Image (cartoon, helix red, strand yellow):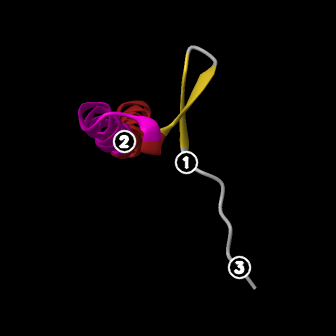
Amino acid sequence: MTDVTAPQTWTIDDKEYAIDDLSESAKSQIINIRVVDQEIAGLQQKLAIMQTARNAYATALKSEIEG
């Protein structure tokens, strides 16, 4: 049995490009975008955690003030 996979593509402005056909510079930019996307996702998770903590602190403060 042969394992056939579709070529990886990158979409820009609704147009698909086969990654294998791109220049090394373009492939490098794709890697950079992927790294940045991963970092953004991590920061979004951290932001969600911080917002949850802030809400908990605000609730604790309100409880402390109002008794």
Q: Which numbered disc covers residue 8?
A: 1
Residue at 43 percent across and 31 percent down: it is 66
Residue at 30 percent across and 43 percent down: it is 35
Counting residues from the start of the chain, the first of labels 2 and 3 encountered is 3
> From mark 2 to mark 1, how far is it between C-alphas?
14 Å
Start and end of the magenta stretch? Answer: 21-39
> From mark 1 to mark 3, how far is it between C-alphas?
18 Å
Residue beneath label 3, please? 2
Q: In the rendered structure, does residue 22 fall within the stretch colored magenta?
A: yes
Q: Locate residue 67 relative to residue 16 in the image: left or right.
A: left
Residue beneath label 2, please? 34
Q: In the rendered structure, does residue 48 fall within the stretch colored magenta?
A: no
- Residue 55 visible in the picture: no
In the image, what residue type sits under mark 3? Thr
Q: Secondary structure at mark 3?
A: loop
In the image, what residue type sits under mark 1? Gln
Q: Locate residue 16 relative to residue 23 in the image: left or right.
A: right
- What secondary structure do most residues of the magenta stretch adopt? helix
Which of the pair 39/48 is nearer the observer? Answer: 39
Counting residues from the start of the chain, the first of labels 1 and 3 encountered is 3
Residue at 38 percent across and 38 percent down: it is 37
Which of the pair 47/53 is nearer the observer? Answer: 47
Residue at 57 percent across and 14 percent down: it is 13
Q: Locate residue 63 relative to residue 18 in the image: left or right.
A: left
Q: Quadrant of the C terminus?
A: top left
Q: Secondary structure at mark 2?
A: helix
Counting residues from the start of the chain, the first of labels 2 and 1 encountered is 1
> From mark 2 to mark 3, how far is it between C-alphas?
30 Å
Q: Dot 1: few (<14), some (14–19), or many (≥20) neighbours within 10 Å?
A: few
Question: Which-is-in-front pick, marks 2 and 1?
Answer: 1
